Amino acid sequence: MGWTTDGKNVVFRSRWYSFSGMRAHLFTVPAVGGELSQIPTSEGGFCSYSPDGQYLALNRMFREFRTWKYYKGGQADDIWVNKLGTTQLENITAGEGDNA
């Protein structure tokens, strides 16, 4: 899904601990190899770190296999911000439709 802000870790998504086909969790692993670490947030999809590395903006569902635009139902993606090190999430989008 991307890299940590220091460029030392790869961010990836996995459904290892998920029971839904549309949701997964985010993990990091050192680029040189080593132990993986789950990012302590709820489900995650596309994501991006803030420049200071303290926050992670993310979608909570997969988008790769979506075939609709301007969708306004329950599977519409919102953008959430996670304060790293916590499970705190804040929805920064509002209104109907797909914001991501």
Image: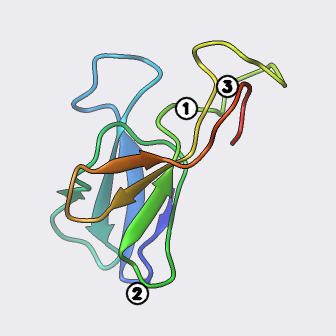
Amino acid type, mark 2 = Asp
In what element is the residue under mark 2?
loop
Query: What residue sits right under mark 2 in the picture?
Result: 6
In x, y percent, where is residue 9? Answer: 35, 74
Q: Are marks 1 and 2 in contact (CB under 8 Å)?
A: no
Query: What residue sits right under mark 1 in the picture?
Result: 62
Instruction: Choose between 83 and 22: the one closer to the eye.
Output: 83
> Viewed as shown, does residue 9 lie left or right of 96?
left
Q: Are marks 3 and 2 in contact (CB under 8 Å)?
A: no
Looking at the image, which residue sits at the far top?
73
Label 3 neighbourhood size at 10 Å, few (<14), some (14-19), many (20+)?
A: few
Amino acid type, mark 3 = Phe
Is residue 47 depicted above or below 25 in this figure? below
First reached walking from the N terminus: tag 3 or tag 2: 2
Amino acid type, mark 1 = Phe
Quarter placement of the C terminus: top right
Q: CA distance from mark 1 to mark 2?
A: 25 Å
Q: Are marks 3 and 1 in contact (CB under 8 Å)?
A: yes
